[in-house]
Image (cartoon, rainbow, N blue to C red):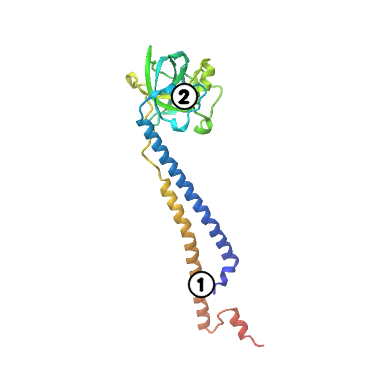
Amino acid sequence: MYRFLLSRQWVILTLVALALVPVMIELGFWQFHRHERRVAQNTLIADNLKAEPVPVERLTSPGHTVPRADYWRRVTATGTFDTAHEVVVRRRTSSDDRVGAHVLTPLVLRDGRIVLVNRGWVPAAADQRAFPQVPPAPKGEVTVTGRLKADETTGASGIKDLKGLPDRQVMLISSAQQAELIGREVLGGYVEQTAPEPAGGSPEQIPEPDHESIGAHMAYAVQWWLFSAGVPVGWFVLARREKRDREAAAAGGTAAGQPADQDAVEAAAPR
């Protein structure tokens, strides 16, 4: 009755179905794990943004790699801005997707060490090789509050660290790179300034990271799992339809006085 399943066409269809099921299940788990990571990151961001700020020296030091658990942690830093070694980070977008630069200014702490402060976004100059208009940093001792971030890398950001850039322009925020240029100890990572607010609203401070949306990863996971369940159901439906069509064809042939199948032909042949 189901001998047609041994045909070349049905063997290939069955093998394809058997291969698709585990692939779709694995894709579902991949999306599910992405959902879990997004939820965990949102929780981390929310918790660190709600935490009381602590002195930046407690969480980082020269050569230190900021761990993910400390990303977006609120910190304070007291010192004097070193505008002579201020640089801009090229090809950064504002909150409304305008292309410009981030202003990275070293803050000399009371103990002589330095922490990099991302003061915010400014529009790019008309000539890409020119230094953009940057509002001056406050003079004298200042206490900065902000979010602690890790040094940027090409692997994590996808941004290439281009060489041969104009003076005082960089592609990535790197404490090691700036320590080499300045010639002094620089704390690992950098501070994304949130206070005090700049006079005149420039540089534009960077908005806090989104920690509300979770994306559609969970919906995609469910879709893949439903697809994986639908494959065997679809295979069964097709097999039943094929069986029904063959039975109808056989019945039609018998009613017209024709043998139903090859077995009937051989039975009717003279011996």
Q: Nearer the viewer, mark 2 or mark 1?
A: 2
| Quadrant in the picture for the N terminus | bottom right
Q: Residue at x 53, y 59 (%)?
A: 17
> Label 1 crowding class (10 Å Cα cut-off): few <14, some 14-19, many 20+?
some
What residue would you read off at disc 2? 60
Going by the numbered disc 1, the residue's amino acid type is Lys
Please state the horizontal and vertical placement of residue 96, each as a whole percent of the image.
Answer: 37, 31
Q: Nearer the viewer, residue 54 or 159?
A: 54
* Residue located farthest toward the left when viewing the structure as drawn: 200
Residue at image point 43% right, 23% down: 58
Q: Residue furthest right?
A: 271
Q: Is residue 138 visible?
A: no
User: Which corner quadrant of the image does residue 215 belong to?
Assistant: top left
Placement of 40 over or under 240, stated as above or below: above
Q: What residue is shown at x 41% (from left), y 15% (from top)?
A: 79
Q: Is residue 131 left or right of residue 262?
A: left
